[in-house]
Image: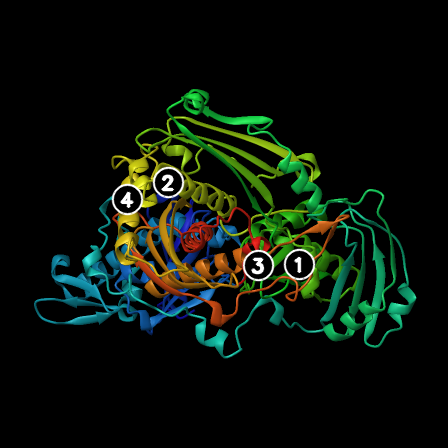
Amino acid sequence: MKHNDILIEIQSLGGQLSRRGFLKLSGAAGGGLLLAASFPSFGEESPTLVGSAELNAYVQVRGDGKIIIYSGSPEMGQGIKTSLPMIVAEEMGANWDDVEVIQAPEVNTELYGRQSTGGSYTLYLNWNLMREMGATARDMFIAAAAVALEVPRSELKAEGSQVTHVPTGQVRSFGELAALAHRQPVPSKETLVFKDREDYKILGQSISQVDSLEIVTGVGDFGIDTKVPNMLYGCYVKCPAVGGELVSANIDDIKSAPGIIDAWSIKGNGNVRELMDGVGIVGTDTWSVFKAREILDVKWDETKASKDSWQAFVAFAEAQDQTGEKVVVDVGDVDAAFTDPGHRVLSQLYEYPYVSHLCLEPMNCTADFRKDENGRDHLELWIPTQSGPRVQEMAKSRYGLDQDQVSIHMKRMGGSFGRRTSQEYVIEAVELSQRAGRPVKLTWNREDSVRYDFLREGGFTRLKGAVDVDGSVVAIEEHVIGVAPGGKPSRFTGPWASAFPFSTMKNIRASLTTRQMDTPVGPWRAPYSNTHAFASQSFFDELATLAGRDPIELMLELMGERRWITPDDVRALNTGRAIDVINTVAKKAQWGRPMPKGQGLGFAFYFCHAAHVAEIAEVSVDQNDRVTLHKVTAAVDVGPIINMSGAMSQVQGAIIDGYSTMAGQKITMENGRVQQTNLDQYPVLRIGQAPEIDVHFIQSDFDPTGLGEPALPPLAPAVANAIFAATGRRVRKMPISDVGFSV
């Protein structure tokens, strides 16, 4: 650190801090914005960098004017490594060209705060704190310039990484002012003035992700690229049926294979989220380990293993009544609406399969379990994970390691979509390193990544609705038939009382029936919403047809007056915002225009993750039932856009992912075994099959929210409804390849 460095960071203030090292701002969420300065030439000792659980980045403004922003949140392609620093830089008045963004080198919640990502929450949780960070820095640089130039603060402006005295044109760079800035009074949170949106220079622009060049040129540092001295390579072989116990294996044959250092059997604890029975293999390179694995002969005891069958689950669902075992929501008088002789009633069953995360980068982790210089156990991990703190918790609970005994380097993820919230692959790597006494990089192959995935659960939704003589929807009943791994319903299995469109209805009933399925499940991009949207928005289109109404007209009627569905809850459905995106997408897609034979438009709206998204799909279906998705028009309200390039990519990626999934992706299991193990059995959309995507953002005045998930749920019903418009045939099952269509 240079002598005139100035560090700006968020800290949770639990104790007394030295005035020499820190200046305190009473700030948000029990923490404060701190300025720390180091002046070794004046006898000042360097401060210890500390932080809070509220923020995951800090800023360093160097004497040469370079601005370093450390990002603590894990990056998996959603762009937060770029967007969060953009907020700080904007409020500071920095020049983006002067900013360098660096991923936090370790997991340290005391220093970097919340180091987890998921649920499209990261931007939402950090927006105001990042603004406060930048605005405080700007204020103190202006104060420093006022002292240096001997002019009133009111005559100064911070912009372009410098402070300008407007009347005379005198300037001082941030670097020149850094040493002086730390001596200025730290403004209170209440006195901070944030920039008006019309004055933004950085926010709202299209800025390439800070790692883009490294990624496209092949030098990007993902988890699987990790190399450390004295490293071995490993794999871990488990029973293909969940719960199978190891009986025997030809360990000696594996040990004698070329390039193999060791092989051994490992007794697990029976917890699929931690460590199952298996065989560990380590060698000099991944290829040797994978080749040795091919000659592995294992006998498993499958007495207690899963006996899951997808076809048995289908039969179970089809036999269920309209109302499920457990009523979750019962509002109004649903039965009266259904029995009214003037009402028309419709009931349909929708099916959606298990699907895989299919991350481009397979699961991997490099672990080094060793003794430190004091003879204490120390675990160092290089890992692509969505939650570094969860890994720390695992190290504590399983290995008894305190935080100071665990070093975690969060590597960039090559995709996750919720998969890397689980930690079992980390434990497998630790077990290999502990036995080997050296660093070991565990790598799953593609088959492992599918077979042992924490899948999006498959399930069924039966919907029943009534429309009155005026064609208005007056009641809806939903019965979700979902899975219960180990006998306990998955937390991602609905129904959810707050889900759209229940929140807008006066007569609703929702119930749940579950069937034990031992196949592991977990969060998959927009959990629950991705399946519920397909069923509910497809069914809504069917109700519109039953009522003889235009589906958009009917949806707008359902929204009613502009209001918050839940008052004072900014993450709740806002019917005004919904109306705006619906009207926008209808106009941009030219909804209602005549379509040639065999072509159709389909509409869907969905609200999730505090985002309002409406989509219209344009498809054609030829005489061989081949579907071509020509164009998707999307209207999105997630508040002000931070990075237009990143936001566009998020929406486009979600739409393509949603289409690829609904087109032909399905995981089935028989006798507890996943039947699909690679891309030849689990087709992925090709570039030439991707549609034109036309995105329109409504930049409302509400605080921004995340965008990694909410554009995916409306895609499947929009396409399904478009297929109906083109063919007159309803799609009530995903993927569409199961009902005779191809892409």
Q: Which quadrant of the view contains residue 654?
A: bottom left
Which of marks 1 and 3 precedes in the sequence?
A: 1
On the image, numbered disc 2 is attached to which residue?
A: 544
Q: CA distance from mark 3 to mark 1?
A: 15 Å
On the image, numbered disc 1 is attached to which residue?
A: 450
Nearer to us of marks 4 and 2 is 2
Q: CA distance from mark 4 to mark 1?
A: 40 Å
Which of marks 1 and 4 precedes in the sequence?
A: 1
Q: Quadrant of the N terminus?
A: bottom left
On the image, numbered disc 4 is attached to which residue?
A: 579
* Residue 207 visible at all: yes
Q: Please rate how many residues cluster around mark 4, counting C-alpha atoms within 10 Å: few if below 14, some from 14 to 19, many from 20.
A: many
- Who is closer to the viewer here, 534 or 304? 534
Tag 2's secondary structure? helix
Which of marks 4 and 3 precedes in the sequence?
A: 4
- Kindly identify the amino acid type of the residue bearing the numbered disc 2: Ala
Return the x and y of residue 373 as percentages of the image width and height. Answer: 70, 62
Q: Which quadrant of the view contains residue 204?
A: bottom left
Looking at the picture, does residue 218 appear above or below residue 411? below
Return the x and y of residue 271 as percentages of the image width and height. Answer: 73, 45
- Who is closer to the viewer here, 215 or 465? 465
Nearer to us of marks 2 and 1 is 2
Tag 4's secondary structure? helix
